[in-house]
Amino acid sequence: MEALRFVVCGRPECRQVFFLCSACDRGRRYCGAACSRRARTESMRQAGRRYQRTRDGRLAHAARQAAWRQRQKVTHQSPPRGAPEATVAGEPARPAMGADAEAGPARHLPHAPPSLPTCASCGRTSPFTRHTTLARTHLGPRWRGGRPP
Ligand SMILES: [Zn+2]
Ligand SMILES: [Zn+2]
């Protein structure tokens, strides 16, 4: 059985973990086409716009944090502060039911999907993963007999 390689997306703003089988492992560094495209655009911008780029990254990070906090608040049933659209006007008889449906056990999946590592490129699954690159694996046996790298 073939092992998939454990890869972390090369975009610092993403850091998505994904897997690649050896057939698809051609030095791919990004989790998807969107990220590799963005990474290319960003590296082209990098020369003249380093400041802008770091600022974008920070904004994206803040947005993710806010979204996460928002989810936490929903789970704990406390209304988000400073979000007037969350306090629903109308239907005064049903707010309690609405809150129950929002934070109830509906979020909990009864059957967790099998989380076998899947090749992000061709969809092949494998119960085995490796954190090393192919190159390093090939170098392995040589170290034993010769000098250290
Ligand atoms: Zn990514
Ligand atoms: Zn593959």
Image (cartoon, helix red, strand yellow):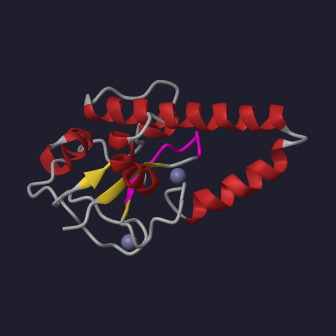
Up the image or down, 6 lies above or below 65; here it is below
Coordinates of residue 76 in the picture (x, y in percent):
26, 28
Q: Is 128 situated left or right of 78 in this image? A: left
Q: What secondary structure is the magenta-colored segment mainly?
A: loop
Residue 92, image quadrant: top left
Residue 121, image quadrant: bottom left
Determine the residue positioned at 34% across, 29% down: 73
The number of numbered discs placed on residues in the rendered structure image is 0
Question: Which range is magenta?
Answer: 11-19
Question: What quarter of the picture does the N terminus occupy?
Answer: bottom left
Determine the residue positioned at 40% across, 65% down: 120
Looking at this rendering, what residue extends furthest in the front direction?
145
Coordinates of residue 72 in the picture (x, y in percent):
33, 31
Up the image or down, 111 lies above or below 22; here it is above
Up the image or down, 101 lies above or below 4; here it is above
Residue 17 in magenta stretch: yes
Determine the residue positioned at 45% across, 48% down: 16
Q: Nearer the viewer, residue 14 or 24?
A: 24
Residue 50, image quadrant: top right
Q: Nearer the viewer, residue 136 or 31?
A: 136
Q: Nearer the viewer, residue 68 or 113?
A: 113
Up the image or down, 67 lies above or below 76; here it is below
